[in-house]
Image (spheres, rainbow, N blue to C red):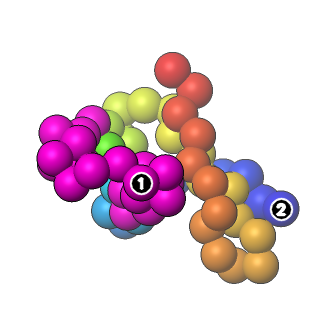
Amino acid sequence: MNIRRADLEHAPRWKRGGEAAKGYWGYEDVWMLRWGSVLTVAPEYIRANDVYVVAEGGEITAFRNDR
């Protein structure tokens, strides 16, 4: 397991991961649309905050924001 600061290119992956997690629990599409902006992580946010990724075997498996 490797923990490191997130790169700006990781922003879209965080949104996809959040959507996948919410989708797993069967939330309706209307809720997914409402949460869209909450699940979005802009590159500017990564640049301005302590955001980390966990990588295992070259694949990112988790994100963490120490805020």
Residue 66 in the image, given as x and y percentages of width and height: 57, 26
Count neighbours of disc 1 (C-alpha within 10 A) and say few if under 14, some if 14 to 19, many if 20 or more: few
Quadrant of residue 14 in the image? bottom left
Rounded to the nearest angstrom, the CA distance separating label 1 from label 2 is 30 Å
Label 2 belongs to which residue? 1
Q: Is residue 28 magenta?
A: yes
Count neighbours of disc 2 (C-alpha within 10 A) and say few if under 14, some if 14 to 19, many if 20 or more: few
Q: Residue at point 62% right, 54% down?
A: 62
Range of residues picked out in magenta: 16-38
**Vertical order, 12 against 48 (above or below):** below
> Considering the numbered disc 1 on the image, is that residue within a helix, a strand or a loop?
loop
Instruction: Judge from the rendering whether residue 30 lies leftward or rightward of residue 9; answer left or right.
Output: left
> Considering the numbered disc 2 on the image, is that residue within a helix, a strand or a loop?
loop
Residue 58 visible in the current orientation: yes
**Vertical order, 44 against 21 (above or below):** above
**Vertical order, 61 against 64 (above or below):** below
Q: Nearer the viewer, mark 1 or mark 2?
A: 1
Q: Residue at point 42% right, 54% down?
A: 26
Q: Is residue 48 magenta?
A: no
Q: Of the residues shown, which amino acid type is indicated by label 1?
A: Gly
